[in-house]
Image (cartoon, rainbow, N blue to C red):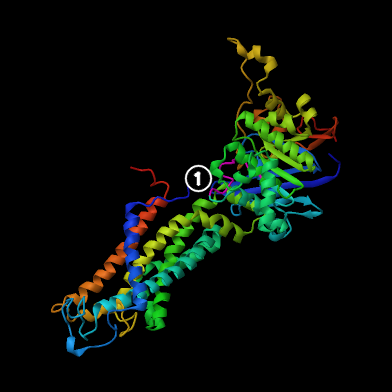
Amino acid sequence: MSDEIILRVEGLMTQFSTDYGLVKAVDGVSFDLRRGETLGLVGESGCGKSVTNLSIMRLIQSPPGKTVAGKVLYQGRDLLQVSDEEVRVLRGKNISMIFQDPLTSLNPVLTVSLQIMEALQLHHGLKKKEAKAKAIEMLRLIGIPDPERRANDYPHQFSGGMRQRVMIAIALSCDPEILIADEPTTALDVTIQAQILELIKDLSARSSTSVIMITHDLGVVAGICDSVCVMYAGRVVERASVDDLFYDPKHPYTRGLLESIPRLDRAEEYGTVGGKRLYSIPGSPPSLIAMPPCCPFNSRCARAMDICRRAYPPETSLAGRSPRTVSCWLHAKEN
Amino acid sequence: MASRKIKLNSIALVGIIIIAVYVVGIVVSLFWLPCDPVAMDTEHVLEAPALSSGHLLGTDEFGRDILSRIMKGALVSLLISIAATAIGAVLGTLMGIWAGYKGGRWDHWLMRLADVLFSFPSLLLAIFVMSILGEKTVNVVIAIGLVYIPQFARISRGSVLTIKSNEFVRAAKSNGASSGFILFRHLLPNILVPLIVQISLSLSVAILLESSLSFLGLGVQPPAPSWGNMLSGARKVMVIAPWTAVYPGLAIVFLVLGFNLLGDGLRDILDPRMRNVG
């Protein structure tokens, strides 16, 4: 991992207009991604993780969605301002994506090799034969046995884990600088999860690809990420390196998340009759339509103060093994 | 490798056999006809079907051989039907998948246009177009094609709407695919099944439309034979010479039946929801 910042997201805001009102799915998200870094984006369902990344790729369906503010700086350009054609050329070649559900992410009527060849033909203008050779090479790289024969198979002839491998092959076929993995292991069972994560880790290290890993599984984060952004209700509430976050969480929400993981070393505590129950954060996230103008976590927070109900906390930089920030009044500095 | 063999069911098979008989008849008619289909013979007017006279299916009110006219007319009918369906299928499908994929304003206006065309009964619309364009065989093709555009547009739009929300469309976009690439590489192959069924059913309706137009004197112009104008001529004499109407009528009935059976059979074969049922 180098210090060169490859992607900078600043104050990203994406909203959806619905019959019930304006949904502020992403409400001012900022982060930097460095070359070769694996950044985890965690948070519960509906906190805006996926929308953040779809906004970066400009894949939000409009209407109803619209990215209303913010910047996505890549190669000195703001991706939110350039033409559709310029973004299209970047997609798949410089920034590519792996989706959550490998069952629906592949076209059922096309062979897998045809789908891997697609990006190669679109971006590198490879001839059919060269693209096919490269597709078979990619299949071998991701560990599909007998790739020459399997290349002509259709997606339904592959298992879920193999299909996710094929998705990875498609995403990495053009050696992108940034790989966005949107919960790539959620639909897979645990042993396959480990293999897929290992594969992503290996392949990204090989070409020093930066990875944005969207997940709600802190185990995945601990396993492969370098740093983490914790999101809550459309905002990043805490950003830190993995070690800082796990050993010394600052935001009460991050603490809550870590408390909610069952731990082997505390097994006796919950196991016995009348023992401690596994912690869960009380309440549920606020509606993204009627967002309070204050800290959205205050109603669920055990340490909420008066000011938490009045104003949104500023982002505060704290010292750590590497620079970290947190948005919480508990840590806000006097000024 | 999955077996690519499609098991034909008996319905489709019967349809194919019927159509094959017509095709053989058309091929034969290109090289050989029992008699000249337009040669009049005042000596043998309205002769009943008989082997001995050389007129297997009899003669019409001008003494022309009915079998020869049916064979000659088959080519015209089938060509018009195929060409018209092709026009309707290509233009209608393009319109439909574009509207369905783009949505919004494109969808709104293209589909309103289709609705306007759809609101006319098909024969009325075809008559209307024919009366504007003039009575020529090419115009029959255009008129019937125009009738078909909204039907194909609706079917393909509906199919695209159900397919396009699939994740693989978004995945293709994230790989840098353009709209055209997504439409033709990803969406079109996924909606082929309903289109193929619609095409085979449209072929049969086109035969009927062409016959209707010719019957009304708007389609193929006499003396060139077509099944429709043969029926039209037979109208005045069918009481005393029923064969003049019966045989062209049967020619229409069986070809339409053939295409309909094929269409129904194909639907059963190709629609996975109907497969393995019963």
Report whether B15 appears left or right of A24.
left
Q: How many marks?
A: 1
Residue A310 appears anywhere in the view? no
The residue lying furthest to the top in this view is A273
> Is residue A103 in the magenta section?
yes
Query: Which sits in the foreground, A39 or B65?
Result: B65
Q: In the current view of this chain or complex, which residue is farthest to the front?
A: B52
Residue B138, horizontal then vertical, whole percent: 42, 79
The image shows residue B1 at horizontal and vertical percentages of 53, 45
Q: Picture quarter containing residue B155?
A: bottom left
Q: Residue at x 68, y 57 (%)?
A: A122
Camera-side residue: B149 or A206?
A206
Q: Determine whether A55 is above or below A225 in the image.
A: below
The chain ID associated with circle 1 is: B
Determine the main secondary structure of the stretch shown in magenta: loop
* Label 1 Cα neighbours within 10 Å, binned few <14 / some 14-19 / many ≥20: few
| Quarter assignment of residue B266 | bottom left
For residue A172, say whether it is visible. yes
Callout 1 amino acid? Ala
Q: Give the range drawn in magenta.
A: A97-108
Residue named by callout 1: B2
| Element carrying mark 1 | loop
Q: Is residue B250 magenta?
A: no
Tell which residue pokes out farthest to the left in this image.
B240
User: Residue at the spot x=53%, y=43% of the render?
Assistant: A156
Horizontal and vertical percent position of residue A272: 60, 10
Query: In this picture, is B62 found above or below A211?
Result: below
| Residue B126 drawn above or below residue A183 | below
> Where does the image place residue A327, in percent across and percent down from the top left?
76, 35
Q: Which of A89 and B230 is in front in this view?
A: B230
Q: Quadrant of the C terminus of chain B?
A: top left
**Along the horizontal axis of the image, is B56 left or right of A127?**
left
